[in-house]
């Protein structure tokens, strides 16, 4: 009759929805994942729950729970409740309703479960000692807290606050306390605190950091002093030798000495008839000094 009146038949299908598409619960509490459905004809549809991960795993199939959900979950209609959830239960769940008697017989909805984990005691990396002037990073990490923790560093139980003129910087999201150049005033007891919205903050045990001077190496000092003394002695010897060669007069081999006599050669010996005396002019040369030749002439008179 509907066909004769020109009206197409109304096709109803199963509808599935959730009033809480995102569920946040604390660790070790119960999580309820709602799933509501309506069918056209089928009053006893098939209900399945699956969890997405690297693959798809069944949570509830063929009227029973599977795997890690056995004994710790229950079904009410199509609503799933998981008892004492842990971080491993976090993820995306899918509720599927199959009504075989309906025209469109499959409907589904997705619910995301976030299990909140309060802060755990973070692991802190603080060296026992560093040298003055070294760059340094103190590390703090809490890998288990959900949502991810933020961090605060303390020195001698006083919170460190980074500023433009501070000698350090703090990455509150990564838990890194960084010094570009440590000094002795940075010596102290350091600890880190992690916190998030899921619970009370937790802190690691304070650890001692000492900033020390570079060690003095006695062997290096002795070797350096000996080398310096040897160098000074060598320089003194060289200076003495140089001065002796430059400033001390020496007699040279007459064959190797050249005399530059500006005066004419001495005349041959003459005899004075009246007093019978002989006079000789004799030239004499002396050894060079300071690169100059000094020649002297002496008049020797022999009578």
Image: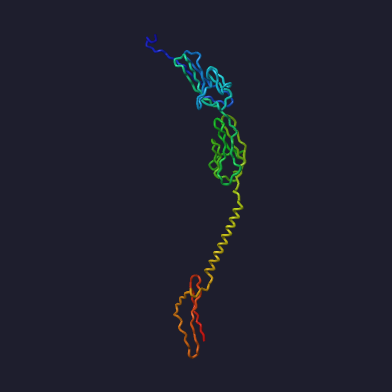
- Against 95, residue 229 (above or below) is below
Q: Residue 239, position in %: x, y?
A: 54, 65
- Against 281, residue 79 (above or below) is above
- Against 297, residue 70 (above or below) is above
Q: Residue 31, position in %: x, y?
A: 56, 23
Give the number of callouts: 0
Residue nearer the viewer, 144 or 272: 272
Residue nearer the viewer, 86 or 71: 71
- Against 300, residue 23 (above or below) is above
Q: Residue 177, position in %: x, y?
A: 56, 39
What residue appears at the point 54 percent right and 66 percent down from the top-left corner? 241
In this rendering, does residue 167 appear at all? no
In this rendering, does residue 57 appear at all? yes
Which quarter of the rendering shows the N terminus? top left
Quarter of image, res 124: top right
What residue appears at the point 58 percent right and 60 percent down from the top-left corner? 230
Q: Is residue 274 left or right of residue 131?
A: left
What residue appears at the point 49 percent right and 81 percent down from the top-left corner? 282
| Residue projecting furthest to the bottom | 274
């Amino acid at each position: 009759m509907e066909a004769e009146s020109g009206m197409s038949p109304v096709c109803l299908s199963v509808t599935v929805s959730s009033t809480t598409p995102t569920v946040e619960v604390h660790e070790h509490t119960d999580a309820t994942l709602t799933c509501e459905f309506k069918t056209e004809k089928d009053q006893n549809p098939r209900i399945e729950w699956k969890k997405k991960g690297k693959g798809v795993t069944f949570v509830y199939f063929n009227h029973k729970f599977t795997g890690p959900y056995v004994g710790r979950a229950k079904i009410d209609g199509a609503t799933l409740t998981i008892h004492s959830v842990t971080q491993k239960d976090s993820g995306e769940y899918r509720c599927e309703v199959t009504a075989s008697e309906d025209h469109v017989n499959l409907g589904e909805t997705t619910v995301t479960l976030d299990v909140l984990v309060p802060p755990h005691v973070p692991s802190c990396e603080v060296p026992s000692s560093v040298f003055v002037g070294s760059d340094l990073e103190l590390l703090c990490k809490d890998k288990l807290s959900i949502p991810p923790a933020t961090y605060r560093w303390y020195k001698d139980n006083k919170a460190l606050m980074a500023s433009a003129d501070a000698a350090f910087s703090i990455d509150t999201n990564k838990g890194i306390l960084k010094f570009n150049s440590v000094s002795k005033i940075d010596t102290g007891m350091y600890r880190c605190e992690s916190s998030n919205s899921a619970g009370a903050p937790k802190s690691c045990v304070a650890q001692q950091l000492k900033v020390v001077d570079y060690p003095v190496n006695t062997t290096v000092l002795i070797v350096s002093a000996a080398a310096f003394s040897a160098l000074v002695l060598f320089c003194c010897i060289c200076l003495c030798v140089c001065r002796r060669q430059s400033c001390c007069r020496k007699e040279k081999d007459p064959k190797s000495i050249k005399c530059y006599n500006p005066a004419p050669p001495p005349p041959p010996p003459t005899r004075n008839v009246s007093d019978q005396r002989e006079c000789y002019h004799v030239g004499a040369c002396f050894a060079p000094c300071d690169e100059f030749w000094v020649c002297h002439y002496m008049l020797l008179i022999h009578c």
